[in-house]
Image (tube, rainbow, N blue to C red):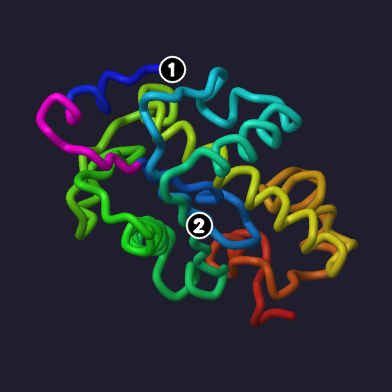
Amino acid sequence: MNLEYERKHLQNGLKFIAGVDEVGRGPLAGPVVCCAIIMPLDDIIYGVTDSKKLSGKKRETLAEIIKEKAIACNIVEVSETQIDQLNILNAVKKCMTDAVNGLSVKPDITLVDGVDTHLPINAEYVVKGDLKSYTIGCASIVAKVYRDRLMVEKAKEFPEYGFENHKGYGTKVHIEKIKEIGPCKLHRRTFIKNFWDEQAK
């Protein structure tokens, strides 16, 4: 895992370097989840990379090790209702900002996955950061495991949609089910309006 960004800031005298990443920007249902994390950089965990490149089992294992070793870790959800009210970009910005501001240790700088979205924090933006930065990679894994577990739990409440399989993403089966029986409270109304008209029902 690449420590280039972290080393640069360490060499500039910074001590606490946070990474933040979001999971759930694209699904039709469920919250967007952000993890902000500060990791010790003298005790690197082997295997950390973009969470999407890992098997579910490997992610689960790594997430527990990461949380155990973290200097500080904070996970924040922004609900589907807030996503509809704010739009997804603003919901992600709120999620990331709240995750960083809620850390028990104040970071000297935060490495943010993605392009510059002008977050109100001291940040460096790293495109494909979950691949290029160890700290962002750790945040990516923890956020992904948290959200996947959440959607599996939600599947027990709303078994007809198959959330345990697709985690709220717009698979063919998921979209057909919404068309057949309509949405539940977890669905983002602004994301399903192309194939579900609330007013027409």
The image shows residue 91 at horizontal and vertical percentages of 41, 63
The answer to whether 129 is drawn above or below residue 87 in the figure is above
The answer to whether 1 is drawn above or below residue 23 in the figure is above
**88 with respect to 10 (left or right):** right
Q: Quadrant of residue 141?
A: top right
The image shows residue 55 at horizontal and vertical percentages of 71, 26
- Residue 75 disc label: 2
The image shows residue 132 at horizontal and vertical percentages of 37, 22
Identify the residue at image location x=21%, y=56%: 121
Q: Which residues are magenta?
A: 9-18
Count all numbered tags in the image, as a single digit. Answer: 2
Disc 1 marks a residue whose amino acid type is Met
The one of 141 and 115 positioned closer to us in this rendering: 141
Q: Quadrant of residue 21?
A: top left
Give the residue pinned by disc 1: 1
For the C terminus, the image quarter is: bottom right
Disc 2 marks a residue whose amino acid type is Ile
The answer to whether 195 is drawn above or below residue 26 in the figure is below
Identify the residue at image location x=38%, y=45%: 20
The image shows residue 161 at horizontal and vertical percentages of 83, 58
Mark 2 and mark 1 lie on one chain; the one further toward the N terminus is 1
Identify the residue at image location x=79%, y=60%: 153
Identify the residue at image location x=56%, y=44%: 67
Q: Residues within 10 Å of mark 1 (few under 14, many from 20)?
A: some
